[in-house]
């Protein structure tokens, strides 16, 4: 604004307050109007105007233009920007021997660098960041104070004289002499595993092209099977390992610099154990100066995976890293800029013209999501709502005044450490936004730790059904007030009847929903074991069509997968299923994917969430195919969906040795056709023409692509996710919006 005002010879002032920027310009009317018009076109790369209001004020005779000190406003709606990847100008300086920041690993400017991860409080000024401990040298202060400079008010501004520095700590606790970057690069090149402190936490890094090295990392990290992200030196190397669309490339090179999921090339040259049984690699580009410096030493693609041991939160504190990762890393490339808010890398894929986040974190969080007035009931936008999400891929969401702030991915809330991390992340968010919730929203599931949090907080709390929250989250993104027909498909969500829901056809508004139909219940024999051992849902489904012969059908499958299935095991299963012992009803689509993955011999155990489904998707072709038989019928005023006819044919095809890619492709088509059929009936019954898709199953691109094509071919409008994850990382948004509508008397606390 300063530069533009100077250029246009206008007087006035500009200041930040916690609600945004306030600019007063004074001069001839034509030029003042031109200023307002020109401003949005002249924004720096990271700036974003969410709203602009202007009004006339009395002239004060200002002839010069000044930048005034930030003030704290009584009503705060601060916008905190996400962390941004190193910009092109900074990169040029980083590798310019004549620049005073030549090879300086903390170079940044107004257009790039850490933001959210280093902010302790607002307004966003240097003393409010973890950079407060570094005192500017003279040249850095001049840049910081000069409105004409690219580093004007760049809070993390620093140089080798005054800023943080990098050190390489070796296994014997000594620090490597000389250049830590060159030394670290040599270690990586030699096949060592390094812990590298970046923007939002520590990564574990190693060569991605050597099977022994990747296996070593896996063994040490106790993370069997999960695909590992690969950081490549540049976009050309990304193209060598993956098939990228031009949109993928745009997203990779954007300031958010997320991990992008893209199909592997046949000749990718990476170790098989990087992403076994996956269609995609998760690739990303260097986004912090330290990454650029490492690759400048000539390294090829590196595995760069969040440094957390299985199930634990991301490691970001130096002492913590040394304590927990000493058996994992051969060295620590660390620095003395504190990370205040740990934040994982984001994971996305591109779909049609949209970016679908799978994990929304660095680069995107905490960018606000504006809520359309139409989906909020106007009386209640004053409410301050904190929604607590679910259990897996946890996030929380703050809603106030029609704006939603979804937290970064906080991990799975399945152990005490993760829960502590969750509670502390909530406290930090409340502090940052000076947000005291007057209402909580949480999942209906009685055993989630987030439910425990809600019930123990002494704030009125509203329980929101899992799949209702899913569909409201996608409606909120599109500003769609509904009602819509919602297809909510995932592994499990607690139903209002206590069953494990997971393939739901809903007539859905922000405030309420009606369950129009669902996948026919089958018993989840063994409870949680049924989500891990994939033979269980296969047996449960087969048993429903073949009450006598299901054992023979299973045992007719050849290969290793039936070796563990002794007749004892199967008899016990039969008794449990018949007596309904630890065998709750389930309509989970996720379990159906598990069952088919088992029948095809692709995956016997889900060592991590959706492993079996990902393996099944990986062998499917993204093309129309002939569906197996399925049923979608209106029965007793509801829609009943059944995959049983398909399961029988698939079991027979598997026993007969049919090619897995053919069976998997047809299976995906079956599910897409079944869901599209159910949506069509639901739309007819309810006179609705909009279908919302949400739930973890829609991270499956073969299913998503075919289903959207089928729905569109029936002239239905389709809402899919573009800002928040389709999985449980998105439900906090839906919970918060639903809670805006609920009255206090519905409180369940
Ligand atoms: Zn920059
Ligand atoms: Zn300096």
Image (cartoon, helix red, strand yellow):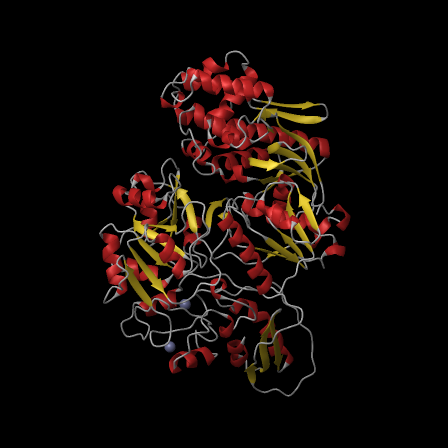
Q: Position of residue 95 (x, y in %)?
A: 30, 67
Above or below, 150 against 435 in this view is below
The answer to which quarter of the image holds residue 16 is: bottom right
Q: Is residue 97 visible?
A: yes
**Which of the two residues, 227 or 326, is positioned nearer the viewer here?**
326
Q: Is residue 503 left or right of residue 606?
A: right
Q: Is residue 656 left or right of residue 355?
A: left
Give the number of marks.
Answer: 0
Q: Position of residue 345 (x, y in %)?
A: 44, 53
Above or below, 203 against 561 in this view is below
Above or below, 734 against 537 in this view is below
The answer to which quarter of the image holds residue 459 is: bottom right
**Which of the two residues, 440 or 656, is positioned nearer the viewer here?**
440
The answer to which quarter of the image holds residue 587 is: top right
**Which of the two residues, 259 or 502, is positioned nearer the viewer here?**
502
Q: Position of residue 433 (x, y in %)?
A: 60, 64
Q: Position of residue 161 (x, y in %)?
A: 34, 77
The residue depicted at 40 percent of the width and 68 percent of the height is: 108
């Amino acid at each position: 604004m300063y530069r533009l005002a100077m250029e246009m010879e206008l007087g006035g002032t500009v200041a930040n307050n916690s609600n945004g920027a306030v600019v007063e310009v004074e001069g001839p009317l034509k030029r003042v109007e031109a200023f307002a018009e020109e401003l949005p076109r002249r924004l720096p790369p990271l700036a974003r105007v969410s709203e602009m209001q202007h009004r006339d004020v009395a002239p004060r005779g200002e002839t010069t233009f000044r930048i005034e000190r930030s003030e704290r406003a009584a009503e705060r709606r601060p916008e905190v920007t996400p962390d941004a990847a190193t910009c092109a100008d900074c990169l040029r300086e980083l590798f310019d021997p004549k620049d005073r920041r030549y090879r300086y690993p903390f170079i940044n400017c107004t257009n790039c660098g850490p933001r959210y991860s280093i902010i302790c409080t607002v307004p966003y000024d240097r003393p409010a960041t973890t950079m407060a401990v570094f005192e500017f040298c003279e040249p850095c202060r001049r840049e910081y104070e000069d409105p004409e400079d690219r580093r004007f008010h760049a809070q993390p501004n620093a140089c080798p004289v005054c800023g943080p520095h990098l050190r390489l700590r070796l296994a014997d606790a000594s620090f490597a002499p000389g250049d830590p970057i060159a030394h670290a690069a040599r270690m990586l090149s030699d096949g060592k595993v390094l812990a590298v402190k970046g923007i939002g936490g520590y990564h574990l890094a190693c060569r991605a092209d050597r099977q022994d090295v990747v296996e070593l990392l896996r063994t040490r990290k106790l993370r069997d099977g999960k695909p590992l992200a690969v950081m490549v030196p540049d976009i050309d190397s990304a193209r060598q390992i993956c098939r990228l669309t031009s949109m993928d490339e745009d997203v990779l090179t954007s300031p958010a610099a997320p991990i992008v999921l893209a199909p592997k090339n046949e000749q990718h040259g990476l170790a098989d154990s990087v992403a076994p049984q996956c269609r995609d690699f998760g690739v990303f580009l260097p986004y912090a100066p330290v990454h650029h410096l490492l690759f400048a030493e000539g390294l090829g693609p590196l595995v760069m995976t969040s440094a957390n041991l299985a199930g634990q939160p991301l490691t970001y504190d130096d002492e913590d890293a040394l304590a927990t990762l000493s058996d994992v890393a051969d060295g620590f490339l660390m620095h003395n800029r504190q990370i205040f808010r740990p934040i994982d890398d984001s994971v996305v894929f591109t779909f049609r013209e949209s970016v679908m986040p799978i994990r929304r974190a660095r680069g995107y969080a905490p960018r606000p999501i504006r809520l359309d007035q139409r989906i909020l009931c106007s009386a209640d936008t004053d409410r301050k709502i904190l929604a607590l999400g679910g259990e897996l891929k946890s996030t929380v969401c703050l809603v106030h005044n029609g704006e939603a702030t979804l937290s970064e991915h906080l991990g799975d809330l399945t152990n005490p450490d993760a829960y502590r991390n969750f509670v502390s992340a909530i406290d930090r968010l409340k502090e940052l936004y000076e947000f005291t919730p007057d209402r909580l929203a949480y999942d209906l599931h009685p055993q989630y730790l987030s439910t425990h949090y809600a019930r123990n907080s002494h704030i009125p709390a509203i329980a929101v059904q899992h799949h209702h929250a899913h569909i409201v989250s996608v409606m909120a993104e599109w500003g769609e007030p509904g009602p819509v027909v919602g297809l909510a498909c995932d592994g499990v969500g607690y139903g209002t009847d206590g069953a494990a829901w997971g393939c739901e056809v809903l007539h859905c508004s922000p405030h309420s929903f009606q369950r129009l139909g669902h996948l026919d219940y089958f018993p989840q024999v063994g409870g949680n074991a049924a989500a891990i051992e994939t033979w269980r849902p296969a047996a449960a489904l087969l048993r429903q069509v073949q009450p006598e012969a299901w054992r023979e059908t299973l045992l007719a499958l050849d290969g290793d997968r039936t070796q563990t299935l002794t007749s004892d095991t199967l008899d016990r299963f039969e008794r449990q299923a018949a007596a309904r012992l630890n065998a709750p009803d389930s309509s989970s689509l996720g379990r159906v994917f598990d069952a088919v993955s088992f029948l095809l011999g692709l995956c016997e155990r889900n060592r991590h969430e959706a492993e079996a489904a990902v393996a099944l998707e990986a062998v499917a072709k993204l093309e129309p195919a002939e569906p197996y038989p399925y049923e979608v019928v209106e029965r007793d005023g509801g829609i009943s969906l059944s995959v049983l006819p398909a399961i029988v044919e698939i079991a027979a095809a598997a026993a007969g040795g049919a090619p897995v890619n053919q069976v998997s492709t047809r299976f995906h088509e079956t599910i897409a056709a079944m869901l599209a059929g159910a949506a069509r009936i639901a739309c007819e019954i309810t006179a609705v023409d909009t279908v919302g898709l949400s739930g973890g199953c829609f991270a499956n691109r073969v299913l998503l692509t075919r289903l959207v094509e089928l729905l569109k071919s029936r002239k239905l409008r389709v809402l899919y996710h573009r800002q928040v994850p389709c999985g449980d990382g998105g439900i906090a948004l839906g919970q918060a919006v639903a809670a805006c509508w609920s009255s206090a008397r519905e409180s369940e606390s």
